[in-house]
Amino acid sequence: MITDLLAALLIGLIGSSHCLVMCGGIAAALQLSMPTQNLLRKMQLQSLLSIGRLTTYSLFGAAVGYFGASAMQFAGVSLLWLRLIAGILLLMMAMYISRLWFGLIQLEKLGQSLWRYVQPVAKKLLPLDSPAKAYSYGLCWGALPCGLVYSTLSWSLASGGLVQGGLIMLSFGIGTLPAILLTGSAANMLTKLKNMQLFRYISATILSIYALYTIWNAIHRLVY
C-alpha cells in the first residue's frame, strides 16, 4: 500500500503541470477574490481552499474504492483482478506523464455534467471572505473536470477498498499542492523542471516499472 501511495504522490507532483493549466488561473483569481490584505489571513484562506479540494478528492476516492471492492465481492471475483486493472491504469498514467499518449484527457468530458451543477454553488461562495467560504469553495473545486484527477480516481476504483481509495486520492492531491500553492519565480522553476523531457521520462519510467510489477504480480497470483 505504501508503494501505491508513493506512486500516487509522484503522479500528482509530475502531472501537476497540467494542474497549472487547469487550476493555476483559478488559484490566482481566488486569491484576488480574498478581500483581506493581511498576508497571514490570505495564507489561511488559501490553505483552507486546498484542504477542501483534497477533502473532495479523498471522499471520491473512498467512495469508488468501496464500490469497486464491493462489486468484485458481490460478483464473487478475486480482488486480484482489481490489482491487474490498477497496474494497467498506472501504466496509462505513466504514458500520459511522459507525453507519449494523451488519451486520459478524454476523461475530462465525463465530469462536465457534474460541474454544471457544482459551479453555480461555487459562485455563490464568492468573495472568499471567511474560512467557511474558502473551505466550501475548495470542496467544489475538487469536482472541477480534470483528466488526471479522473484517471487517478479510476485507479482508486481498483484499489481494493474504501480506505485505500481515499488514501490514494489524498496522496495524489498532496502531490499537486506545490504547483497550486507556489507563486512567482518558485512556480516557474518547478514548471521548468517538470517540463524537462529527461525528468518526465525518468518519472514515467519509475511509474512504468511499478505498473509492470503490479501487473505481473497480479497475473502470477491469479494463475498460481
Image (cartoon, rainbow, N blue to C red):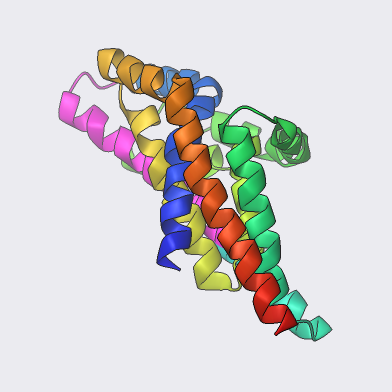
Query: Residue at coordinates 48% horizontally, 30% vertically from top-left?
Result: 200
Does the segment drawn in magenta span residue 55? yes
Q: Is residue 183 left or right of residue 111?
A: left
Query: In the current view of this chain or complex, which residue is farthest to the right?
Result: 75
Foreground residue, 185 or 141? 185
Which of the 4 image quadrants contains residue 41? top left
Residue 17 visible within the image? yes
Q: Is residue 141 left or right of residue 196?
A: right
Which of the 4 image quadrants contains residue 128? top left
Give the number of marks.
Answer: 0
Magenta segment, which residues? 35-61
Query: Residue at coordinates 29% horizontally, 13% vertically from top-left?
Result: 184
- Expressed as whole percent of the image width and height from the top left, the position of residue 195 reads 46, 20
Magenta span: helix, strand or loop, mainly? helix
Q: Which quadrant of the figure contains the C terminus?
A: bottom right
Which of the 4 image quadrants contains residue 73? bottom right
Query: Residue at coordinates 44% horizontally, 20% vertically from top-left?
Result: 196
- Expressed as whole percent of the image width and height from the top left, the position of residue 169 reads 51, 54
Residue 145 visible within the image? no
Does the segment drawn in magenta span residue 54? yes
- Expressed as whole percent of the image width and height from the top left, the position of residue 186 reads 26, 19
- Expressed as whole percent of the image width and height from the top left, the position of residue 150 reads 65, 45
Query: Residue at coordinates 45% horizontally, 25% vertically from top-left?
Result: 198
Foreground residue, 16 or 196? 196
